[in-house]
Image: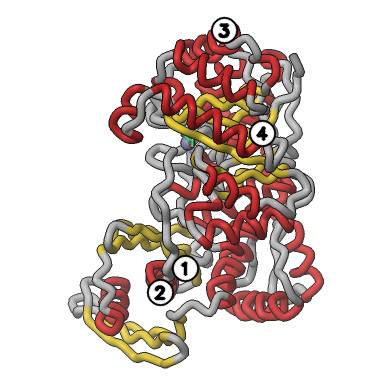
Amino acid sequence: MTDQLIIFDTTLRDGEQSPGASMTRDEKLRIARQLERLKVDVIEAGFAASSNGDFESVQAIARAIKDSTICSLARANDRDIARAAEALKDANRARIHTFIATSALHMEKKLRMTPDQVLEQARQSVRFARNLIADIEFSPEDGYRSDPDFLCRVIETVIAEGATTINVPDTVGYAIPELYGAFIKNLRERVPNSDKAVWSVHCHNDLGMAVANSLAGVKLGGARQIECTINGLGERAGNCSLEEVVMAIKTRKDYFGLDVNIDALHIVAASRMVSQTTGFVVQPNKAVVGANAFAHASGIHQDGVLKARDTYEIMRAEDVGWSANKIVLGKLSGRNAFKQRLHELGVELDSEAAINTAFAAFKELADRKSEIFDEDILALVTEQDAHQQADPFQFISLAQQSETGERPHASVVFSRDGREIKAQSDGNGPVDASFKAIESEVKSGAEMLLYSVNAISGSTESQGEVTVRLQRSGRVVNGVGADPDIVVASAKAYLSALNKLHSNAEIVAAQG
Ligand code: KIV
Ligand code: ZN
């Protein structure tokens, strides 16, 4: 068995299924470029048949990324698979990932199919896919809760039809490490042609064990591919987190004895990019990428680390990309330094005009803030993306008055499809007043599920980054806005969420 472990990133597909984490094509492309820098082996770029938007994202990523294999999810039917193959046709290396549920519960209640029908559909789909693309992954959805005898029949059948990777999802995060490891081992031992495919693990984090389960699937079960997402993004409690699982394999090579291609230096930048794009803030005590992951507050620890860092540190912060963030730009930095920093951050703007616009925004920010951190640059580019897409709502300006004992008042100027609108309102606070002002004109009727503010780089001079999560007719979107003035950041985030609500992405409910 090989000692190389394949890292399959599904931030752009399973991660995006997290309510409100939907990303635009350009945002996905930018993240895909960062994943390529990280040297991720396989990037699951989306679910091409689920919407035209997803198709275009998969296609754009397939065209732009050269080093990683690009994969599209597809349900086990000819239409989905043909659509995935079409979106992937320009990729250097392409993979179709097809799936069908195999647990008794899912087959009976969701699919309303008999086990024999599911087996037949799995066979036909893999046969069809294999005629289009050589690299085929098959997932029995809810695999961990499936009857092992039936699962063995399905897996043997799809390998015989040419599936090259067999992924065993713990779709609902029910597994326990030893049991999941033994489950994979048992399947590999019982399926007669198991050596013809790479075995893969895909664990959800509902009981907080996605990383532990994935590692057990590798160590005890013999799997050689791990499916994961940046920051553990994903539906409900999320997926196995890439940074944690990769650093476990690297740091405990003595135990796992496996190699991964990942260039860990780009981990922190990838984490920030995903967090800023989706508005899902990383908890400070999150392993590897949390703001406190390498901070020692207690005197005893600090003393120990100063004398010998390995007294309390098992990894080096700079090895996962923390030190890179110390580099700051300021108002004297020129266009070239800015362009170089964009490049180092994995941001490739597609024209000189786009760089000029971003540079102008950078200069404007630098006039108001003496040091510009990486997070500021990423926030600025995220905002610029929204402008490039000519979204209907654009922020123009805001004025607000608040005084102890007085009811706050806000006046917001924004445009809708190029037409300037002036709105004003009172509110419980200046943020509330500015949201009410916007809403008084837009009348979206959306329900606010979340409002959060995060200081981008620590001090009060920092930009505030605001996330607003809105829900309307069952659709959940996140808007993100950044500005040194948090009321302005809030209004921008609100308008950004409205823009997403107004985009008519037709979405097919995906599983997983
Ligand atoms: O969790 C899951 O079962 C999935 C499959 C589609 C692989 O995401
Ligand atoms: Zn999943």
Q: Is residue 51 above or below residue 349?
A: above
Viewer-closest of 193 and 483: 193
Inspect the image, locate mark 2, and give the three-letter code of the amino acid beneath it: Leu
Inspect the image, locate mark 1, and give the three-letter code of the amino acid beneath it: Gly
Q: Earlier in the sequence, mark 1 or mark 4?
A: 4
Badge 4, how many Cα within 10 Å: few under 14, some, many 20+? Answer: many
Which quarter shows the N terminus? top right
Q: Earlier in the sequence, mark 4 or mark 3?
A: 4
Q: Is residue 30 left or right of residue 435?
A: right
The residue at the point 55 percent across, 28 percent down is 123
Q: CA distance from mark 4 to mark 2?
A: 36 Å
Q: Name the spot of residue 294 as percent of width and height, x first.
A: 59, 37
Badge 1, how many Cα within 10 Å: few under 14, some, many 20+? Answer: many
The residue mark sitting in front, 2 or 1, is 2
Badge 3, how many Cα within 10 Å: few under 14, some, many 20+? Answer: some
Inspect the image, locate mark 3, and give the three-letter code of the amino acid beneath it: Arg
The residue mark sitting in front, 1 or 4, is 4
Q: Which residue is mark 3?
A: 190
Q: CA distance from mark 2 to mark 1?
A: 9 Å
Q: Would residue 401 be seen by someone viewing this image from the given angle?
A: no
Asked whether disc 4 touches disc 2, contact meaning CB atoms under 8 Å apart, the reply is no
Q: Which residue is mark 4?
A: 7
Which dot marks residue 434? none
